[in-house]
Image: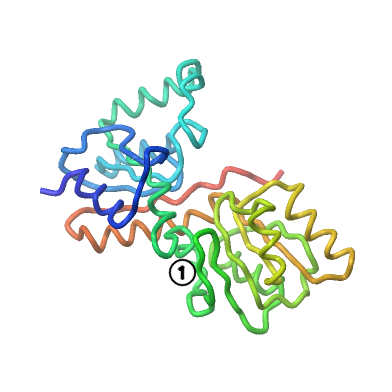
Amino acid sequence: MITVQDVIDQLEEGVMLDSSTVDGLMYGDSKDEIKGITVSFMPSIDVIKKNVDLKANLLITHEALFYQHHSNQALEKNNSLVEEKKSIIEQTNLAIYRNHDAIHRYQPDGITHGLIAELDWQQYVNEQESAYSILHIPNSTLAKVATQVKQKLGINYLRFVGNKDMKCEKIAVLVGYRGNGPTTIPLLEKVDLVIYGEGPEWETPEFVWDASQLGVPKGLIQLGHAESEDPGMKWLANQLKDRFPSIPVTFLPTVRRFQLI
């Protein structure tokens, strides 16, 4: 019998999580036998309901259930939508485990690794750090890179800053909210292009804009938070399929939230 705790032990193997972690079993009993597993970036209501259709009783999610990175008791107690979502979860008898910190602490970072694998860029990796990877892709331009990213990730459009025809062979790849200035601006001293999920628009985009005004060839491509981290959770689902071959494991991709109007 494979239990919820057996899966948690696998997810946390070789990783040190301290008392400040957001990871953990949010709902369910760790002693329950696993019937099926789903893996998602977000634990949205549609994702939770899909577990019933799939007869899965463990959901592994990257982000939080109730709309903030850290638990906010005031929000959770005084919001009717939160209460309704809690009721739906309780009716499903679903175990929900949040795996945010652990996967980011894998060696290499599992979310970044998953994105690079989905882009089929593993052979280009020159340097791997906890917050980013640096790649060397020969004979590339910003436009060529953007086209590859859109095709591999199934993204209809991308936001970028810089000259789309600029040469960019040295590229830093970051996921999630790591597009902040303190992380990405120093990287632009040694790379041509940064690709990241999201970050404050008054920081790195403005740095790249000013660089372009001075004739310095720098660029950025913004994927979106979910678009940058979904591949990492897909990679995790595949790891669990290998580790627990007798259990159905399903990756549930994120439905795009933002639409063009």
How many numbered markers are drawn?
A: 1
Q: Position of residue 26 (x, y in %)?
A: 33, 34
Q: Position of residue 108 (x, y in %)?
A: 43, 65
Question: Which residue sits at x=80%, y=68%?
Answer: 163
Q: Position of residue 76 (x, y in %)?
A: 46, 22
185 left or right, relative to 46: right
Task: Please tell me whether mark 1 sits on a helix, a strand or a loop.
Answer: helix
* Observer-nearest of 222 and 135: 135
**Mark 1 crowd level (few <14, some 14–19, many ≥20, 10 Å Cα):** some
Which residue in the rendered view is the most extreme toward the right? 214
Is residue 27 shown above or below 156? above
Question: Which residue sits at x=66%, y=59%?
Answer: 184
Question: Which part of the image, by quadrant, shows the C terminus?
Answer: top right
* Observer-nearest of 19 and 40: 19
Residue position for label 1: 117
Residue 30 picture quarter? top left
Is residue 220 shown above or below 26? below
Q: Position of residue 161 (x, y in %)?
A: 76, 60
Question: Which residue sits at x=65%, y=49%?
Answer: 199
118 left or right, relative to 97: right
User: Label 1 is placed on what type of residue?
Assistant: Ala
* Observer-nearest of 147 and 169: 169
Residue 205 picture quarter? bottom right
Is residue 170 shown above or below 24? below
177 left or right, relative to 123: right
Question: Which residue sits at x=46%, y=30%?
Answer: 71
